[in-house]
Image (tube, coloured by chain):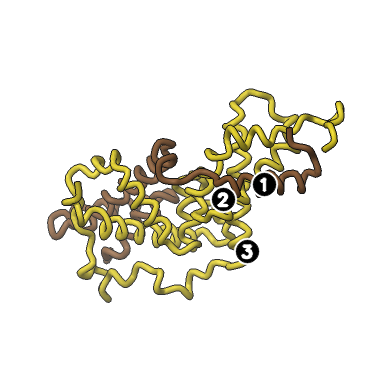
Chain colours: A yellow, B brown
Amino acid sequence: MTEPSPTRPRLDSDRWLRDHGDYLYRYARVRLHDDQLAEEAVQETLVSALSGQSRFAGRSSERTWLTGILRHKIVDQIRRRVREQPMDVASDPIAGVDGDFDETGHWKQSAPAAWPDNPENSFSKQQFWAQFQACIGRLKPNLRAAFVLRELEEKSSEEICNILNVSSTNLWVILHRARHHLRKCLETHWFSAESRP
Amino acid sequence: MKHSCRDFARAVSEAYDRPLTFLERTRLELHTILCRLICGWCHRYAQQFKLLRRFAQRCQDELWVERLVPGLTPDARTRIRKKVMETTGGITS
């Protein structure tokens, strides 16, 4: 191993990996729902951070700075995946919500059931969050990507249209499907079994 | 003008992603009032969508994420370290 030359910035990726690796990986894993993609996002973050560390002015914490880079890498991962499997909203009727309505547009038997009076009680239950993650994981990849970008990353509709390469009308349909399925999944796997401890 | 439950459901979701027109908002409100008198399903749907947004915000709490998502395995750390070194051609400290 050669010594770093005095003109070369000190490379801190080992320390970053030690101090922030788990945090960054979990952040990416929650959003990408894939171990390998999350790992790649962390790796790409460290590479970018190394080349841009002179721009880190110390105004934010190191973790905040690295997380900012990671968020871009997560978007890159989603963009790459969408390029490989473009979204086709029209030809995906099974993923639609129409099956829950009759021909006149009224609810069928699958109408929303009542949730408990205080669904906030679930906030303190680890099992609930496990189920919530599982339900996000059950969404089709494209629906999940749109939901994560909108609700977890809080990106604007315009930004998401650009990332996913869809029209705004299609994005609204996609987001509705995602929320519709997520609502139903939580109802089936959590709230309807409210007798749980 | 006819405004079905299916139209209502779509508008409830779109309200989170774009500003609704005055007409759309009025229809939503009227539908909610009527729905509460009849079956309550649409009102329930809208309330549950509100909760979904709160769940999505809270699911990122570090406490839960730490408990639910395992960290990097030693193998993954080794792979990342190796790839970073290869990519940058540098020496990690």
The label shown at residue A44 is 1
In front of the other: B11 or A32: A32
Q: Nearer the viewer, mark 2 or mark 3?
A: 2
Q: Position of residue B49 (x, y in %)?
A: 32, 51
Residue drawn at the location 60% of the way across and 42% of the way down:
A70
Residue A72 drawn at (x, y percent) = 62, 45
Give above or below for A92 relative to A172.
below
A157 relative to A104 in the view: left or right: right
Identify the element where label 3 is drawn: helix
Query: How many numbered discs?
Result: 3
Q: Label 2 neighbourhood size at 10 Å, few (<14), some (14-19), many (20+)?
A: many
Judged by depth in the image, the label closer to the viewer, 1 or 3, is: 1
Three-letter amino acid code at disc 3? Answer: Arg
The image's mark for residue A23 is none
Mark 2: amino acid? Ala
In which chain is the residue bearing label 3? Answer: A
Q: Is residue A161 left or right of residue A50?
A: left
Q: Earlier in the sequence, mark 2 or mark 3?
A: 2
